[in-house]
Image (cartoon, rainbow, N blue to C red):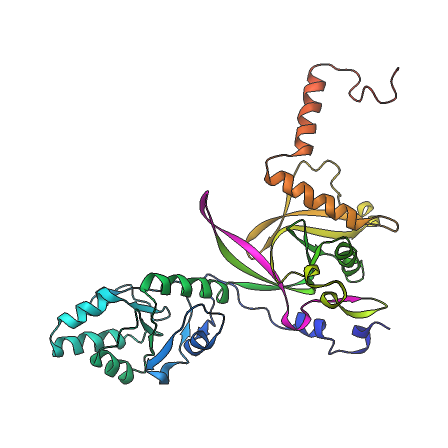
Amino acid sequence: MDPRDSSPNFPSEALRAADPVSVGDDVPQGISVAELIDDPTLDLRIVAHAGRAGLDRRIRNARVQKSGLALVGHFHGLESWRLQILGATEISFLESLDAPTRARACDGFTALRPCAVVVTRGVQPLAELVEACERHDTPLLVTDQKSSSTINAIHSYLDDRLAPRARIHGVLVSIFGIGVLLLGRSGIGKSECALDLVMRGHRLVADDVVDCALVRVSSANGPARKVVVGAPAALLEHHIEIRGLGILNVKDLFGVTAVCERIAIDLVVKLSDAAEGTQGLDFDRLGVDERHHDILGVAITEVTIPVRPGRDIAAILQIAARNELLKRAGHYGARAFRDRLEQALLGGVADIGGGKGGAR
């Protein structure tokens, strides 16, 4: 018996039933300042110096602010849900002020209730700044890194943590480095196909539940672009369910090279019963016109592959991944064939397929 038929608490079913993370330009729930400074994945050492009562404030934007003008009373544009950076320039300006003016500047700045203020270069925070942060419960954080390194580390961390997310029922595999997301009805053979691909030397990313995140990727040839990155749910990582065998640990069975922690989704493959082609589902015969599947606002190339007994779907997926690599290099086989066909028809060539079965 299929375990999900007998147990309502089967892990993947419970995960798919969970509410997906909210999607938007600014993730509404954000993360707390306490989460930021306690997370070991942050490539930066930050300590809380004052204002610890406000460590539960939420960071809701991945971009930090370096709002030195706020210290002179110009508060326009300062957003309380973004981290505020005070570097050597801002600190030296505060030091140049007399004590009463410095106290007013620090009080006005922290009274805006920014989620946190980060002082860089390991500078000992000024007494007036510490007092103002304590008064307004504004977390005052200190790092020994310079401002540029601090900003880069925080941006990289928050880009990942605050990325818009979605949870998809499917299987994600890495084929020749191409992230291929398999979709289709339950029981059509997505997991079995993924296992076949693993046995051919490819890598499993996620089975049954794929956690997707929208991230920005910088490009040497142009502006940063948005890509959708897929990863397994933490509970199901490295595992795959095969009907009749149950839950298998792919990493234990095939080694660490058989799994992948996360990968950008480059191709969406819908597996469909072959009979559906006679019920209005139009399977592509030429491959000239590209279809796309929308995930988190990103249009990803989509193909639909009919499934029937005896058809080697894993081999077809390998070809689909290779074809995607060719397209990235600017080689479109189907379009080139169409152009040749049009030229042949316009040129009046009688036997387009000449050679095959012709006179010897």
Residue 305 image point, x, y percent: 76, 47
Locate residue 125: give its quadrant: bottom left
* Figure check: 135 above or below 344: below
Residue 109 image point, x, y percent: 24, 73
Residue 122 image point, x, y percent: 30, 72
* Figure check: 339 above or below 46: above
**Secondary structure character of the magenta stretch overall:** strand
The answer to whether residue 108 is magenta is no
Observer able to see residue 59: yes
* Residue name at image x 78 percent, y 73 percent: 4
Count of marks, rendered view = 0
* Residue name at image x 39 percent, y 80 percent: 55
Camera-nearest residue between 336 and 221: 221
Magenta region: 218-242
* Residue name at image x 63 percent, y 73 percent: 18
The answer to whether residue 227 is magenta is yes
Locate residue 10: give its quadrant: bottom right
Q: What residue occupies the far left of the structure in this picture? A: 98
Camera-nearest residue between 289 and 3: 3
Residue 61 image point, x, y percent: 41, 66
| Quadrant where the image shows the C terminus | top right
| Quadrant where the image shows the N terminus | bottom right
Observer able to see residue 290: no
* Residue name at image x 59 percent, y 64 percent: 166
